[in-house]
Amino acid sequence: MSAVIEIEGLRKTFHGPYRSRQVAVDGFDLLVGRGEIHGFLGPNGSGKTTTLRALLGLVRADAGRMRLFGEDVPHRSAAVAGRVGAIVETPQFFGNFTGHRTLRLLALAGGVPTRRVDEVLDQVGLRGRGDDEVKGYSLGMRQRLAVASALLKEPELLILDEPANGLDPAGIREMRDLMRDLAAAGATVLLSSHILGEIQLICDHVTIISRGRRVAAGPVEGVLAGHDQHEWRVGVPEQGRAAELLRRAGLPVDEYAEHLVVGGVSDVGELSRLLGEQGLWVRELVPLRPDLESVFLELTDDGAERPELVDEPAPADAGEGRLIDLDVTVGDDPEARA
Amino acid sequence: MNLVRAELERLAARRFVQLMLALLVAAFAVTAMTTLVGSHRPSSTEVADAQRAAAEERQSLEAAYQQCLAAARGTLPPEEADDFPDDCSALDWAQRDRLPVATDHLQGVFNFAAQARPLLYLLILFLVLFGFLVGASYIGADLSTGGVVNLLIWRPRRLAVLGAKLGTLLGALTVVSVLASTAYGGTFWLIGQTAGMPGATGGDFWPWLWLTWARGVALVLFAATAGFAIAILGRRTAAALGAVMAYTVVWELGLRVVVEVVGIPRGEDWMLSTYLDAWLTGEARLADATVCQDLSSGYCDGTYQLGWGLGLAVLLALVGGLTVAAFAVFRRRDLI
């Protein structure tokens, strides 16, 4: 798969008054292949928007190499601009312009046939509101208008910074369907968003940036698998005794009011057998898979607490992990913990 | 070309531009209406009376001059001779810029030729203000709302985009200036023809009018370019307005006071208004007592002149410098 976006070693420092400086992006790499829906994640101030702005030629990089469709940017930006549609943060529009006029002016400036205006208004669900002034639009409608402006050129690459901002749940779903349709039609989408659930639902690849550096990248499933702790939620009648048994077997155990969370489980059958041999019959056994949010919080150090894990039905294959040491004995019930 | 078309449509659709155009039309309309209401076509009796009064005034001036000469010759009684200066050239009506004419004595009658100069300066003032505000807000609003960013994503050539914007602005302002001047000048010419007097429009009247108008339109374009450039440098419309306010208060008013108090010779040379005056009127005549100090003989009125050429050079240097700085800064600026 050929690369649509290539960023290597991007650096950008902003200089403020009194010689203050802020490193926004520090040796960041990004690779987006053709046809991907690529999620771009990072906490506020991590360098996401600066990266996108640098890629679009709006911010001058201090160092690094960027290419779009194989062309060096920003030097050759003009050569590829017609193939790239983008919105960066929430674009502002003149309030007294209608949505139609806003798009028409962009189409004129970009040499795009103005018939595309009605098409994209329809595409983003603003048909019927195109003749209204933008100042009467809700935040979600402005966001749709921004996406419409990015779609005008029928771009091969769509760069969207927080496109779901201000959208209601139905709007978010429409936006998700739109991304999928675009990808199905062959477009590549780079999607920056704080709605991690959405990224996980929409994107096939993801790059996570923290403090200006890439901390994870690859297919979404691969990134999640790389942070799988092989944890299981275990419900047993004598929770304290079971916890001690498992700890003696070398497994990390966290005790909760109604269940245990056991980590490092590579063979859940062995886990069940170990407990059963001691008369501890398992009534609940659920694998805990990390979601993108937990991985994100772990990688970006923004989560002060333990990442939230989500429940999933037990898969046929429990996956790889550490083997349970079965050569243990069961001692007294440990003191019950909450 | 498409970019220019888009920019032209964007400029015309801007609410601020429409408001400023409405204010411009309203100002012209008020000026024309008050002129029209305050003027009437003079009757033949009024004209005859005015002609007689003008003739009497000219005779009176001639008589005073002759009496001054008589006083100088010593043929006038001493008590009368004391009323006249030693140098009678000041009373020589032949050396005056203009002689008393009949229209000076027509009350409530608009004289097109006589009023053309102040009316033209008023028109230029309106248009300069219009040009500066529209120039500053056109790019200032685009910068502060992110409109420029949107455009640059589509057309990632900063200088070309900025050049297209400036070119569109200046082209549109030229058209507006021509149309507004035609309507404004035509209205007052018509008032002169129908409800007043056309006045003496012969000689160099029309050449002077056209030349001054052309200089005025150039001044409008200078003002718009300066507003545009300062707004880019300051990233917003308010920067241009603030810069002009600050310059006016600190330099034109504050420094002028300091210059007068300290008694710095030729202090006017440091004022931009001097060069505006020189360019628009063709020559700025400025007072300077020191010019007569080295003069042992001959006439010295204590003034010196700055020509339109120097005025144009200073304005071009200022506007050109601002524009080059604005384009250079914008070319490298991070748009965040």
Image (cartoon, rainbow, N blue to C red):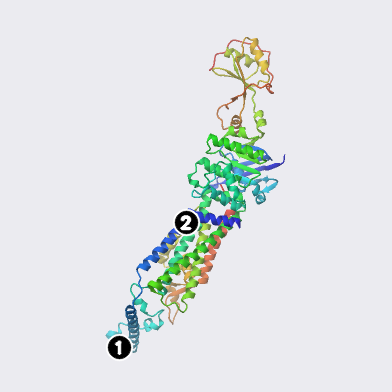
Displayed quadrant of residue B113: bottom left
- The image shows residue B15 at horizontal and vertical percentages of 47, 53
Judging depth in this view, the residue of A89 and A47 nearest the camera is A89
- Residue B18's disc is 2
Q: Which mark is residue B76?
A: 1
Does B59 appear above or below B316? below
Lateral position of residue B141 relative to residue A2, left or right: left
Q: Chain of mark 2?
A: B
Q: Position of residue A238 (x, y in %)?
A: 58, 12
Q: Is residue A9 placed above or below B79 in the rendered structure?
A: above
SS for dot 1: loop
Q: Please name the amino acid that badge 2 sits on.
A: Gln
Which quarter of the rendered picture does the N terminus of chain B lie within? bottom right
Residue B81 shown left or right of residue A201 in the figure = left
Q: Where does residue A137 sit, x and y in percent of width and height? A: 50, 43
**Residue at position x 54%, y 65% in the image:** B316
Q: Residue at x 56, y 36 (%)?
A: A172
